Image: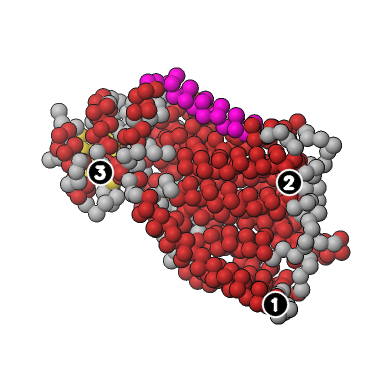
Amino acid sequence: MNEKINKKADPAWAVLFLVLVLLTVIGGLKTLFLSADIDESYAVTMAVRLCKGDRLFLEMWEPHQLSAVLYAPAAALWLLVCGPYSKGIVLFLRCFGFGIQALLSLWIYLTLAGKKKDKGALLAAFLYLNFTPKHIQSPEFTTALYWSVTALLLCFYAMIREGRGQSGGEGPKKSARLLPVFAGLCISAMVLCYPACILVFFYAFLVLLRLDQAEGKNRKRAAAFFITAGVMALCLLLYMALRGDFAKALSDVSFVLSDGSHKQSLLWLWKGHLQAMFSAGCISGGLLVLTFVAEPVLKKKKKDLSFLWPLFLALQGVYMLWQFHSVDKKVYYDYLPIVFQLALIGGFFLFFRQRREEEADGGARKEWLAIAYMISALATAGVLSMSNLPGVYSFGFLLIPVVLTIPYGIEEMSRCSKWEKAACLFFLFVMTAQIFAVRIALVRFSGNQHRTVFEDYYKVNQGPLAGIRLGADDWKHHDDLLHVFGEQMEPEDILLYVGPDYFIYSLLPPGKIGTGNTISTPLFSQQLLAYYERFPERVPTILVFETDYIDDYRKVLSYEPFEEFVNRYFDTEHVEYVGTQIVMKRKK
């Protein structure tokens, strides 16, 4: 974009910058201080358990427990400063997570903008800052994977540019020599979050081998990357060995894999995921197919093809705009399928509509974005292969390369006709509006119920959620649960809780959590009884039910093996009601 255009655009971009800052502040405050749900509580609980002495694969049987290694140090810092009852730890971890994402957004801007004040890079950074795949800001395993993928891609861009003499110096800087090491750390974090992301490791290693061979690096970067990842794996194994019985921990992996909430077959899971992909991408896919059919025909007839790209973007923009009519009826993740469509659009622009034959950087950015799309797709596949959630949750990883493509799309606009520019601007505006609308207006809630910021919220003043505002029902349930903790539990009690609020486990002293797996669904599998056979000292002395977690708590008591367990240990005749909580004490 030439200097004249830049001067004309500056006032508009200044206004846009201020608007983006304002919306980011509003969305950030809402995300930090509003609502909480079961997935976030599960992640926080795992970190607190590690900090209080529970060991991986021994006392802890959660399927995502390895991810807690990444953010347990932050939790440990908070517990050290604020005491063992972890008051306010959720707000602290959210602020910590927001800080990480802000730094990554700054890195995106500096990478894409280079030495110039690039407006597209600025927009890309803001869009990245205001989106997470599950709308959880604390370093939960899915969010941590989102950050790790981003950092890995930015490392690859720096390595590609450095290898092609684009880094701005005579030779590689010292910081550049550390890039493959940092990339190895990123891939290690990804595998801790979702072990199936080992697929990304193999792909990234092969890419580095190819780059080293092409650039005469004698495979130094690939070796550094491989060794770093290997050393991190050995460190994890050493940590587990020093913390307990390593052989027993390995044997307990089978119990972890027996988790009742993740027992679905891969075939069943992928059937649902493919259906979600089809429904999310049918419009984009249809337009892509039409383009590939129409373009060769039109080229043969020497027709003008300039209408295809803007038409494609305009139709997508209209579709996204149409989605807004139901914003008052949908939950936050109903808007994630649009990310899948955006990924198709980004790939379409990058590989098929780019007009220049030769790029100033020797094709570095195009090669990088091709790698970015592949790594994001493999990371998405890794999540889908291990997640029991609908596929739409995982589409968010596909937004990363789309965001990275934005500056090049805006740059391309300088060579477009007026109506092409109009279509591109319309699409960018609607995409930006969609991301901010979901960030600001919709609220994540356990059970995937519809919540917006326009409802009443009440502040929690004690416990792990101190400082967070919850909806009226959530606040009442949490307050009742705190009363149970304060009035019904004795210091020697061991708790088993059945409901969506596992933040309560973070209040307990070491050894007082009466389950190896703090997800609720394993209560209905043999995993629960196997845990008590291994750790009879952890059989709970108090059982607490959330009244509306299931239609009738007595239905839970009829599920095997839970029925056998309750009848054996608890007094089912004497039940106490504490507001929205039902309390059973162990038989004398």
Cβ–Cβ below 8 Å for labels 1 and 2?
Answer: no
- The part of the image, by quadrant, that contains residue 318 is bottom right
Front residue (pair 582, 137): 137
Is the magenta region chiefly helix, strand or loop? Answer: helix
How would you rate the neighbour count of disc 2 (Cα within 10 Å): few for under 14, some for 14-19, many for 20 or more? some
Say which of marks 1 and 3 sits in front. Answer: 1
Q: Quadrant of the N terminus?
A: bottom right
Type of amino acid under label 3 = Phe
Q: In this orientation, does residue 489 appear? A: no
Mark 2 residue type: Leu
**Left or right: 300 with respect to 344?**
right
The secondary element bearing badge 2 is classed as: helix
Q: Secondary structure at mark 1?
A: helix
Q: Residue at x 43, y 29 (%)?
A: 50
* Residue designated by label 2: 110
Structural distance between the alpha carbons of marks 3 and 2? 50 Å
Residue underneath mark 1: 300
Labels 1 and 2: the sequence-earlier one: 2
Write down the residue under mark 3.
Answer: 524
The kind of residue tagged 1 is: Lys
* Magenta part of the chain: 224-245
Q: Position of residue 161 (x, y in %)?
A: 75, 44
Report the side of 123 relative to 226 (left or right).
Answer: right
Residue drawn at point x = 67 percent, y = 70 percent: 309
**Relative height, residue 295 to residue 365 (above, below):** below
Q: For the view shown, which residue lies furthest in the left direction?
A: 573
Residue 236 in magenta stretch: yes
**Residue at the farthest top position:** 242
Task: Please indicate whether residue 241 sits to the left or right of residue 579 in the image.
Answer: right
Between disc 1 and disc 3, whose residue precedes?
A: 1
Q: Reading the chain from its start, which is encountered first: label 3 or label 2?
A: 2
- The one nearer the camera, 573 or 116, is 116
